[in-house]
Amino acid sequence: MADDMNRSAAEVESRAAGDGNKRNASEVLFTGERNGDPDEVHGGDRVKAPRVDRGGESSETPDGGRGGESGETPDGGSGGSGKASSLVKQGSLLSLLTLGSRIAGLVREMVKAALLGTTPLSDAFTVAFMIPNLFRRLFAEGSIAVAFIPTFKGYLVEGDKEKTREFLSSFITLLSFLVNLAVLIGITLTPLIVPIFSLKELDETILLTQIMFPFLALISFAAFLQGILNSHSIFAPSGMAPIVLNVVI
């Protein structure tokens, strides 16, 4: 009787233990599904579920980057094309302004021919305008294009504003001294230069030449300012200056 009772108790305990193991296993499976665990459980062992790559999505490369994603080019992307388009735009604008200055110059010559004709006064005006223009190529376009712009561009690339201001101050001081000295010498020597052309209206030519010589100082300072603008890639005023000059004359 006692053995039967012990046997019955042992069977009850074994059944209870079996029910508890089944309950624990079901709880593990339920918990894994609820937590979104992609791993599967088979017989108490956890097995990694295979991961499926989706088409079109980028995967990480060994160097930590993502494959399939486009990166920036070493030169900064489309900066080169922007500079090229800006250069083409500025060049086209300058070409149109140069064409306009040539047309304005033609109109100027037509007006002069209509008003003065081929008289000695026309020759006097031509010589008076030609002599300062000859020195303009030396002091204005020559020195500015050859010496000033490359040096000033170097200071801009260096990026030191204090040195740039010192250079501009020194250059404008030197330019002012040389140009004003040239104007004074030109006005003084005009009576000796003009007779070389053997004109009939000698006195009128000397007077007109002396009046025109300060034009050398003004055009030199204008070329200096145009050089600064050109160094900053601003070309429109340089193209407008000849048009204004032809209209005023």
Image: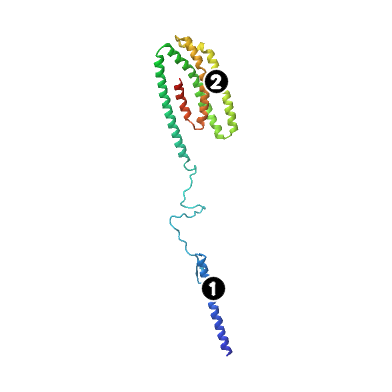
Amino acid under label 1? Asn
x then y, percent, for residue 143: 52, 24
Read off the residue under disc 1: 24
Q: Residue furthest top?
A: 200
Q: Quadrant of the C terminus?
A: top left
Q: Is residue 248 above or below residue 202?
A: below
Residue at the image position 47 percent from the left and 30 percent from the top: 236
* x, y percent for residue 125: 45, 15
- The residue type indicated by label 2 comes to Val
**Dot 1: what SS?**
helix
**Closest to the observer, 241 or 170:** 241
Residue at image position (46%, 27%) is 240
Residue 153 point in image, percent of width and height: 53, 31
Q: Up-down: is 36 above or below 14?
A: above
- The residue that mark 2 highlights is 179
State the residue at coordinates (46%, 24%).
244
